[in-house]
Image (cartoon, rainbow, N blue to C red):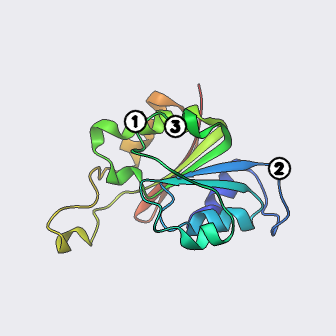
Amino acid sequence: MHVRVFLDAIGVAPSEGKFLGLDVLDCGCGTGKGALALAKAGFRVTLCDFVDGRVEEAKAHALPFRQIRTLWDDLRPLGYHDYTYCCDVLEHIPEALTMLVAHRLVAVARQGAFVSVATSSDTYGVWIGESLHKTVKHFTWWRDMFSEVAVVVDARDLLGYATFYLRQR
């Protein structure tokens, strides 16, 4: 989970459950662990993903969930949010579509989009005979590509992954 890095990037201190008055769209939320941490930090969180069966714990905490067809579809029907939060998702998308997704994440975020990507190959794809990471690129590639679709406010090259905070131009 990258919630601490997200909070640092946007300059917000966690509120230990007290509502901050800010909302986040967790795009590609997976099991909902990140969304629960965001809610605990004081955000109103909406989750979206392709499959809804993995987010039972988040649903039990009354976090709304929206099923989407693909992340490169138009996200505007989900509404505008203060932030979008997309962690460990873009590396699973084919390279040709990664910046379209980044553009869509930024477009529905009033204040900015937080993105985390793995910068190394996955270790689980061998079990299914196919790499799970479709776009494995180094930090500078991601940073330079993001700068073509948004303003890169914060960029961190971390061990095995990188984080970026993006805003609309």
Dot 2 or dot 3, earlier in sequence = 2
Q: Work out which quarter of the rendered image holds the N terminus and state it.
A: bottom right
| Callout 2–callout 1 Cβ contact below 8 Å | no
Q: Nearer the viewer, residue 101 or 53?
A: 53
**Left or right: 19 as drawn, with respect to 71:** right
Tell me how far mark 2 sits from mark 3, CA to CA. 22 Å
Q: Residue at x 33, y 54 (%)?
A: 92
Q: Residue 134 at what x, y percent from top left?
A: 26, 52
Tell me how far mark 2 sits from mark 1, CA to CA. 29 Å
Q: Residue at x 77, y 48 (%)?
A: 22
Q: Nearer the viewer, residue 158 or 7?
A: 7
Question: Looking at the image, can residue 151 be seen?
Answer: no
User: What residue does disc 1 label?
Assistant: 99
- Residue type at tag 1: Met
Q: Residue 129 at what x, y percent from top left?
A: 14, 67
| Callout 2–callout 3 Cβ contact below 8 Å | no
Tell me how far mark 1 sits from mark 3, CA to CA. 14 Å
**Left or right: 96 as drawn, with respect to 22:** left
User: What residue does disc 3 label?
Assistant: 75
**Element carrying mark 2:** loop
Q: Residue 145 at what x, y percent from top left?
A: 40, 35
Q: Residue at x 28, y 45 (%)?
A: 94
Q: Residue 7 at what x, y percent from top left?
A: 69, 57
- Residue type at tag 2: Gly
Q: How many marks?
A: 3
User: What residue does disc 2 label?
Assistant: 21
